[in-house]
Amino acid sequence: MINLVSMKNNSFLYLSFIVAFFLISSCSKDDTSELLVMEDRIFDNYLLSNNITSEPTASGLYYLEEVEGTGVAPVVNNWVSINYSIYTIHTGSLVATTNEVLARNIGIYDERVLYGPSKLMIGNNISGLDEGLTLMKEGGKANLLFKSDLGYGNKIIGSIDAYSSLFLKVELIKVITDPVQEEYENTIKFLEAHEYSTDTTDSGIYYIPVITGTGDSATIGDNITINIKASLLDGRVLYEANNQRFQIGSFEYNATFGLSEGLKLMKVGGTSRLVVPYQLAFGPYGKNYHDGYYRIPIPPYSTIVYDLSFVSL
């Protein structure tokens, strides 16, 4: 079992490495070679301190399997669902995780993060993670150790310093060979589990009226007031607001077609649930948290569940 904080309790030599690391970090770009030398020393000391004697891959990745999976092995361009935690080796600190409870306990919780399983495509991530995932099987867990050349290099990413070696704990939940079919099947399962109709409207959304309003309906261009909650199929909330102004037919976020279509079916005073397929919502690329009202990232190929109240026209 690897002790992620063993370096903190190590000898004076380690402390000297850390002091030198930050001193060098303040130097000019001409000192890149010194930074890399220091990173090598810290990484080697970490391997020694944790008695890691396994051989790395040709790229320099240390792959340490904890649980061997029993499912399929992913390849480049496959989509996968994973849980992960990221630690920087020079501090032993957790800097990112999909585990909300862990993030809260460690004190790094961020309301802009969508906690829970992360959906990503192999080949679009840092090299150390991509390579490590191709060595795993569905259902497996592994630890990945690698230097910054397989990570973020000279970039500063959040709490990760430039030239930071990383330690990743990864769980491969599912391999998704066809994200379109996968999301469609998950949508049908959601509808059937809630005993909703699996028939779409002419526009392609699933409309579930809850309370029929008695007021007027909205048309393209109307500015209306709504209460809204947007969630993923698994219940994770993306956005929630009361008395939100919304223009029917607007293209804010480039993702409101399905929402507008559903609102046009409602009347003032009504409530409904809309289930909007990804192609009528945020598309195959999702959205970053800084776009529009949404403050957390929206995963690619995501069906969106809207719970709506039509307050006024």
Image (cartoon, rainbow, N blue to C red):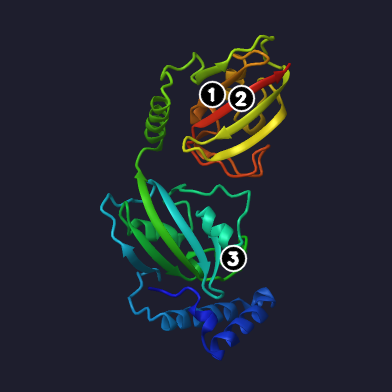
| Mark 2 Cα shell of 10 Å, populated few (<14), some (14-19), many (≥20) | many
Q: Secondary structure at mark 3?
A: loop
Q: Nearer the viewer, residue 25 or 47?
A: 47
Mark positioned earlier in the residue sequence (3 or 2): 3
Amino acid type shown at disc 2: Leu
Residue highlighted by disc 2: 308
Residue highlighted by disc 1: 274
264 relative to 52 in the view: left or right: right
The answer to whether the residues at label 3 and label 2 have Cβ atoms under 8 Å apart is: no
For marks 2 and 1, give the CA distance.
8 Å
Q: Secondary structure at mark 1?
A: strand
Residue highlighted by disc 3: 160
Viewer can see residue 9 = yes
The answer to whether the residues at label 2 and label 1 have Cβ atoms under 8 Å apart is: yes
Q: x and y percent of residue 202 in the render?
A: 49, 13
Which image quadrant: the N terminus?
A: bottom left
Instruction: Give the image quarter of residue 266.
Output: top right
Q: Residue at x 34, y 80 (%)?
A: 53
For marks 3 and 2, give the CA distance.
39 Å
5 relative to 28 in the view: left or right: left
Amino acid type shown at disc 1: Leu
Task: Kindly report which numbered mark, 3 or 2, lies closer to the viewer in this rendering.
Answer: 2
Q: Nearer the viewer, residue 111 or 156?
A: 111
Amino acid type shown at disc 3: Ile
Q: Residue at x 56, y 74 (%)?
A: 91
Q: Residue furthest left?
A: 70
Mark positioned earlier in the residue sequence (2 or 1): 1
